Amino acid sequence: MENSENNDEIKITPNDKEFESVKLNTWESIKKFLVELFDIQTDSDRDATIEAVKKDISFKGHTAWILIFSIFVASIGLNVSSTAVVIGAMLISPLMGPIVGIGLSVAINDVETLRRSFINLGVMVFLSVLTAFLYFKISPLTEETPELIARTYPTILDVLIAIFGGLGLIVAKTKSGTIASVIFGVAIATALMPPLCTVGYGLAIGSGPYAIGALYLFSINAVFIALSTFIVSKILRFPLVRYANSKRRKRTAQIASVIAIAVMVPSVWLFVKLLDQQVFETKTKEFVKNIIKYEGAEVVKFTQDYKSKNIDVYLIGRPVPQNKINEWLSKLEKTEKLEQTHLRIYQGADQSGEMAAKLSGEIKAGILEDLYVKNEQLIQDKDEQIRFLENQIALIKVQNVPFKELSEELKINYEGVETFSYSNKITTNFKKTDTLPVINIRWKKNVTTAEKRNDLKKIEAWIKFKLKLDTLQVSEYP
């Protein structure tokens, strides 16, 4: 009996079997769906991709002229700070071909294609920089624009764009039937051409840092696009180039491996360095915004230097006591990624030569501009108040005229007046409102013209004196 009870306890019912079967089928379906969703090997045409990449490496004839014209268009767009024009130039640029060729040739051990890719890329870069240099040398517009300045130094975002843009490009090229829209989008996102135009601009105006920084940005984009191509080619197992000579095959594989390592190791190091710099700048901004606060004092400007690990903060207003500054320094030491950073506070109350030197023309200009804008607003507000008060005075004047007293005195002194009226005429030029007192006299029929003229002058002088008016309009009823 006990054995039978134990058997009943571990017995699996038909319902349990059905549930396990449904669960297994569901998981298999989900797994199959995910595999199909992210599978890029099934629909990849490796031979056609290699052929297409090799075809795009070539740089002569039409391609050379397309590059020259696109560089001119991009230079003009950068010169006038037009993003739309720069994007248009990037769409027709053929710069991407040799860079993808470098990544693919290293992945498949194709030394000949690698050599062609490097040569064509060098020619493209030289021709691009030369074209941009000639344009900016001839152009009368040499002012720095936001579009030019944005291409003078790379950031971690540029690296990420180059990585994912390169991945998107090579994956699109491996698909049976190239996705043109993806290729155009990558050309815009990775922005290979504007940095080369900025190199030409830097050389044209004699600015070495501009030229070097822009060339650095181009190099980073090119390296990470090539690296992305190499990675995808390896993942998709592109066929290696076969050589009849086994020694040559081995030597070629070694060369390709050395080049791959030479590209990957510095790229990883550069990525980490730029990421660390970006984190440093972000942390610095957060620290100054959230910690550097003192009632009566205001941060005019702050600068940070990643290399020297210095943060310079400029304050105006009420002087900050040293104990408060020490508190900020203590918090800085406890802030992640800013432990070794030096905080230097410059206050407006400091009249030393160092403070005067640190407050650059740019800072002063910013302060003056801010004060100017505020003062202009205050002046406009006061003008509005003056106009309002003038209108109110005009209305009060109309309401407070002693008309009854005037008419009685006029009747006693000037018997020839038959009727008398007084009014205030309100006029405006839509900027200012004025009131003009007006009197109208109707004379009796027996009054002569000479008497009318003489009495009108007296009446005008009398009313001006009586009402303390500067201006008065006198007219007669016909």
Image (spheres, rainbow, N blue to C red):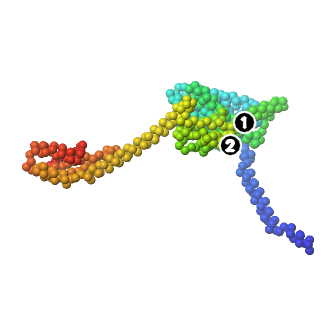
**Nearest the eye: 16 or 296:** 296
At 71% from the left edge and 34% from the top edge, which residue is drawn? 102
Tag 1–tag 2 contact (CB < 8 Å): no
At 57% from the left edge and 40% from the top edge, which residue is drawn? 320
Amino acid carrying label 1: it is: Trp
Q: Nearer the viewer, mark 1 or mark 2?
A: 2
Can you give x and y, in whole percent of width and height, for residue 399 in the image? 27, 53
Query: Which type of secondary structure does the marked residue at label 1 adopt?
Result: helix
Q: Is residue 284 visible?
A: no
Label 2 environment density (alpha carbons within 10 Å; few <14, some 14–19, many ≥20): few
Can you give x and y, in whole percent of width and height, for residue 418 in the image? 13, 52
Amino acid carrying label 2: it is: Lys
**Badge 2 is on which residue?**
334
Single out the residue that lies furthest toward the bottom.
1
Single out the residue that lies furthest toward the left.
446
**Nearest the eye: 362 or 155:** 362
Label 1 environment density (alpha carbons within 10 Å; few <14, some 14–19, many ≥20): few
Q: Is residue 425 visible?
A: yes
| Rendered image: mark on residue 433 | none
How far is mark 1 from mark 2, CA to CA?
A: 27 Å
At 33% from the left edge and 44% from the top edge, which residue is drawn? 432
Can you give x and y, in whole percent of width and height, for residue 1 in the image? 92, 74
- Whichever of labels 1 and 2 marks the residue nearer the N terminus, that label is 1
**Nearest the eye: 238 or 321:** 321
Q: Is residue 149 left or right of residue 9?
A: left
Q: Is residue 355 left or right of residue 158?
A: left
Can you give x and y, in whole percent of width and height, for residue 310 in the image? 64, 35
At 25% from the left edge and 48% from the top edge, which residue is drawn? 425
**Badge 1 is on which residue?**
269
Q: How many marks?
A: 2
Query: Which type of secondary structure does the marked residue at label 2 adopt?
Result: loop
